Structures are given as C-alpha cells and as structure tokens.
Amino acid sequence: MTQPLFSRRALLASTLALAACDGRPAASQVVEGPIRPLRDVASFPVGVAAMTDHFRDPQWTELASAHFSQLTPEWEMKMEYILGPGGRLRFAAPDAIADFADQHGMSLFGHALIWYSQGRAYFEGLDETRFAAEHDRYIREVMGRYRGRVTGWDVVNEAVAEDGNGLRDCHWSARFGQDGYIRRAFEVAAEADPDAVLFINDYNLEHNPRKGSTFLRMVERLLGQGAPIGGLGTQSHIDYDIEPGRTTAFINEMAQFGLPIHVSELDMSMGRSRTDLTRIERRRELQTERVREVAEAFMALPERQRFAFTVWGLRDRDSVLRRGDWDDGRDEPLLFDWLGRPKPMLKALEQAFAA
C-alpha cells in the first residue's frame, strides 16, 4: 500500500494549524482539538465520493486517506462516462479510482449501473432485441471488470418519480416496464457478480414522505417478485431545516426488510431560499444536529444492516452544490470547510460512530 505523505496524526495536526494561521470564520464553524479518524472509530466502511481530479490535490488525498475507508466514484463510473459512441466502453477513470482505493487500503463501491437520466442517446436507436442484448452486455462487462474489487453496486439509481407519485418513465421502462427494468437489471447483476451487494438507491426519501413510501412499496413489491435486491440506499441529500426525527423515522422504516442499508450520498445543505432569515450561526448548529441524527439513526440499526456511511464530497469546495447552477456562493454542506478545516459535523460523526 502506498504510504501517505504524513501520518494521520500529523495530518490532523496540520489541518488544525491551518485554521490558526488563516482567516478564521465563526467559532461555530471550525472544530478545536483532535478528531479521531472516522475510519478508525467506525465498525463499518466510511465512504467519500471521489473524482480522478481530486487525486492531484495533496490535501484532498491526505484528508480522504486519513478519515475514509471506502470510495464511491462520483461520476466516472456512471454510464455517461463509460458508454461511448457505438457502444464502446472506456474505463480509464474508474480504473484509476479503483487503483487509488487499493493503494490507500480502501474498499470501492460501484455507482451506478442503470439510471433513468443516462444512456438514452445510444439505447433509443436500437431495436428491441439489440436493446436488451446491449443492456445486459453493459452490466456484465462493467461489473465483470471490477469483480472482486467492488463490494457493492448501485444497480438501479433513482427509480421513483420526483414527486413520489409512482415510478419514473424512462427509456428503460419503455422497453422493459417500470418494475421490469429494475428486476432485469438486478437479475443480470446478480449473475455478473454473485458476491457484490446489490443496491437500489434513491434521494429525497426523508424530505418527501410520499416518495419515501413509494420507495418502500416498490422494494416490497420487487422482493415479492423475486428480484435479487441485496441492499437499500438512501442518498440523504438533506437540508438543514428538515423536521427533527424525520430522518430517523425513515431509516427505521427501511430497516423492516432486514437488508443492509447504505447512507450513500450524505450532504447537508444550508438552504438556498432567499426568504430564509435564519442566522448563519443557527443554521450551522441545526446542520450539525441533523447530521448527528442521521449518524445516530444509522448506528441504531442492527450491526448486520450497517453496510456503509458515505458523504458526497470532502470539503465544501468539492460539493456538487458549489458547482454551476447549484452554487449560490454560500452553501457549506460538507464535513470540511473550503480550506480543509474540520467542522462540527465531522465531530458529530466521530462521536456517533464511536458510541
């Protein structure tokens, strides 16, 4: 395994030293004192989303290898990256992420195989027979390449309609049916890698009770049809002002199936509403409380159901919420601030995971 440039203890000390010599934000935003690496206090994988550009950033590499024991490719293992013209597959970036994980003693989680928003341009031009063959080939070849290196896969991502009223219509459901395309993807995936844990993953399940209920009914129905679903993923892109207890209630409902659960893409937005007049200090307090709630609800699961706990980015500047149209210039959704300094959310996770 490649040795890090600094020891974990030295890295954490240098991060705190940076806070002392740089422009410091409000005291509530930067944690004073030591924080144990999350990977050392958790009894399950603690993951972070990664892109290959991050590997050229020494601070990102050091923080990620110090605190996290699993990587999820943020974009470069999705069909949008892998599937090229004429059905050709490219693997340069996901190979690099898999190699980085190996070199730093991390496991790798595969994200994502079948997603309603990707693959349309290529697949819609195929006749029925070729469509089915190419769908199955894609899953088999991608999973086969990483068999033995990936612990689990998001086989189907975001199948539930945005408003929670049923399932999405997409190019996959148009050919195989709304339940049919999900069932087929899981059946092919189970053959391609019988050892990987196969997840169905979605978002806004905590915020939108209708969507959460539709997701759970879908899982129950598909399991009844024999679909080899092996785990449930809740992305947990959550806003700081979500009602207390709602996240806990949904995770408890997910647990009813006895399947492994993955908090798969956690971030905690500070909110982008211009009518929200809550003081920034209070927003940060509530943000930390809600992250603590997610972690404590996860820890309350039976040990066998705690698959992994993943955050969707490392520092605030790495967040998808700080890119393009998403960016309002103010959001602080991740565990480390723009300069890589630890925030109270990180301490909340350390405390919850060590309990």
Image (cartoon, helix red, strand yellow):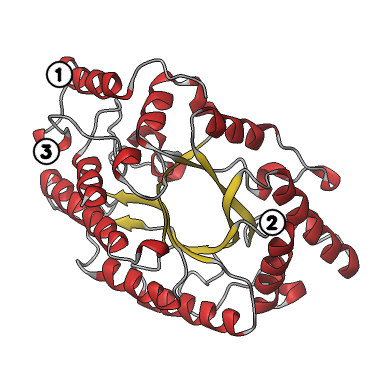
**C-alpha separation, residue under disc 2 versus residue under disc 3:** 46 Å
> Front-most of 343 and 6?
6
The answer to whether residue 15 is left or right of residue 74 is left
Q: Position of residue 307 (x, y in %)?
A: 44, 57
Q: Please state the horizontal and vertical placement of residue 126, each as a whole percent of the image.
A: 86, 61
Looking at the image, residue 243 lies above or below residue 220: above
Instruction: Please report contact status of discs 1 and 3: CB closer than 8 Å, yes or no.
Output: no
Q: Secondary structure at mark 1?
A: helix
Residue identifier under label 1: 20
Give the distance between the C-alpha atoms of the residues marked 2 and 1, in whole angstroms: 49 Å
| Amino acid of disc 1 | Ala
**How many numbered discs?**
3
Q: Amino acid at mark 3?
A: Ser
Which residue is found at the position 60% from the left and 53% from the top?
112
Residue 275 visible here = no
Label 2: element kind:
loop
Q: 178 or 228, which lies in front?
A: 228
**Mark 2 or 1: the one toward you:** 2
Residue at image position (61%, 40%) is 76
According to the picture, the residue beneath numbered tag 2 turns out to be 193
- Mark closer to the chain start, 1 or 3: 1
User: Residue at (32%, 61%) from the top-left corner?
Assistant: 298
Mark 1: give few (<14), some (14-19) or many (20+) Cα within 10 Å: few
Q: Crowdedness of circle 2 by 10 Å Cα count: few (<14), some, many (20+)?
A: many
Label 3, on which residue? 28
Question: Mark 2 or 3 closer to N-term?
Answer: 3
| Percent x, y of residue 240 | 24, 55
The answer to which of marks 2 and 1 sits earlier in the sequence is 1
Tell me which corner region of the image, top left, top right, bottom left or bottom right, holds residue 312.
Answer: top left
Report helix, strand or loop for mark 3. Answer: helix
